[in-house]
Every structure is written in structure tokens, then in C-alpha cells.
Image: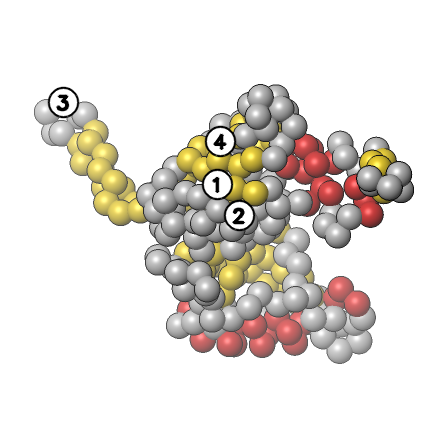
Amino acid sequence: MPEYLLPDVPFPENARPYRAMFYLQPYNSRSQSPWTRAVKTLSLSKPLWVARVTFRTGYDGYDGADAWGGEMDAWIAEQEGGARTTELWDFRRPYPPGLRRYYSQFAGPRYPFANGEEFSMGERFVLPAESEPLNEAAARGATEMAFAGFLPNEPVFLPGDMIGGDGRPHIILRAAVADGSGRAVVRFIPPLDFDVPAGSAITVRPPGRYQLVSDDAGANETSVGELTEYTLDFVEVPS
């Protein structure tokens, strides 16, 4: 079991936002000298992720992707205006583009077993373009993490890629290239809130715990025969 708390309410299985905002919000205090006008900035606490997600869905008379309006209403109601938490991730980049680019090169070639039988990467148990690389252990407070098992000297992560493993997302700051042994070290913010054991980092939809910022998030005025649009604002819940 993880050390960190899990969200109270799961994200709806069928929900897919068509617009998303996701950013790390610092919490700073600024003061300006009345004589020199120099500005002093102090970081008061750790930054938190802020998200806005917009959904468009329907009710009776709609089928398929447009028919989960009821599921959306239930999800919002279950959160009780932010009294309970839900899970979110950066919907714009649910899987690191750097890793997708790296693993996509293995989709075509074929490889032999010891008995001569061949297989392709597309026949493996995981999707080759969305594999989870294995990480080395990282301690609480760390801003770097090492991953292994890559081809030597290959670019594997890009700036803006997201990783997790301690119950919140972390954004990678610099491109990472595997060294001669296939090991790549990524630098990220914010620092880890908890230890991340070896092999437990998350790169596919790294989630965090969020709460609604409005009691009226469930307001959903709808015209007959038209889709309903929900715009929901969330803030990360500190661990």
C-alpha cells in the first residue's frame, strides 16, 4: 500500500474533457521597497497543481461518447463541493511524449526466442508506445530520479513530461538522454512528498488528489436537445 492518501472518488470511466488547463501554482509573498523599489519574493509553502477541465456531454437521446451526462452529475455530487477528493492528471499529456517517441521505434522489428520462434513488440503484453520504464528508488524531498533499461545514448524524456509515484504529478525540467549503460536521470519539480520505491514510478496518467473549489460546480443548465457543458475548477490537496 502507498504511504500517501488515495482519492475518495474515482474519475469517471467514460469522461473525456475536450479542454484542459493544468499548471503548478507557486505560493509567494512579494514586498517592494519604498525607497529603491526593489521587489523581494519569498516562497511561503510548496506549490500546488491547479486544474480546469471542461466536458461536453448529453443525456436522454444521446448514444456513445455523448451519453454520460448522468455519470458526470453523479461524479460531481459525490465530491460534495470539494469536501471529498477526486483524482486528476494532465489530460493534455496523459503519457510522456518523450517516452512515446522512444518506445515507438520498437513497434516494427521482429525478435527471436531461443527456439527460433519470432515475435514483434506489438505482440507483447503492454503497448510498446506506453510502457512503464523501471525507476531506481528515490527518497522524499528528491528532485531527481533515475530510470534504467533504455538503449544507450537514446533521448527518452522531454521537458514537460510528467511522472509520479508519490501521489502527485511532477514535471520534468530538462531533456534526459540515456547514458552508455541505458540509465537516464530526470530532474523535476516539485520535490517528492514521499519515498518512491524502485519500480513504482508512474508515467501513464500520473494522478494527484484534487478538490473542487466551488459549491456550485454541479450547475448544469441545459437546452432541450443540446449537449451540456461543464467547466470545473480544481486545486490539489496538500499531502
The type of residue carrying mark 2 is Gly
Mark 4 lies on a secondary structure that is: strand
Q: From mark 2 to mark 3, how far is it between C-alphas? A: 52 Å
Outermost residue toward the front in this view: 115
For marks 3 and 1, the one nearer the N-term is 3
Q: Which quadrant would residue 62 be assigned to in this image?
A: bottom right
For marks 4 and 1, the one nearer the N-term is 1
For marks 2 and 3, the one nearer the N-term is 3
The type of residue carrying mark 3 is Thr
Q: Give the label, 3 or 1, closer to the camera.
A: 1
Write down the residue under mark 3.
36
Percent coordinates x, y for residue 17 in the rendering: 63, 56
Disc 1 crowd rating (10 Å Cα; few below 14, some 14-19, many 20+) is some
Q: Residue at x 75, y 32 (%)?
A: 105
Q: Residue at x 45, y 55 (%)?
A: 167
Q: Give the label, 4 or 1, closer to the camera.
A: 1
Q: Residue at x 23, y 34 (%)?
A: 41
Write down the residue under mark 1.
136
Percent coordinates x, y for residue 15 in the rendering: 65, 63
Q: Is residue 77 above or below residue 164?
A: below
Mark identifier at residue 151: none
The type of residue carrying mark 1 is Glu
Disc 3 crowd rating (10 Å Cα; few below 14, some 14-19, many 20+) is few
Q: Give the label, 2 or 4, closer to the camera.
A: 2
For marks 2 and 4, the one nearer the N-term is 4
Q: Give the label, 3 or 4, closer to the camera.
A: 4
Evaluate if marks 3 and 4 touch, with contact meaning CB atoms under 8 Å apart: no
Mark 3 lies on a secondary structure that is: loop
Disc 2 crowd rating (10 Å Cα; few below 14, some 14-19, many 20+) is some
Write down the residue under mark 2.
199
Write down the residue under mark 4.
185
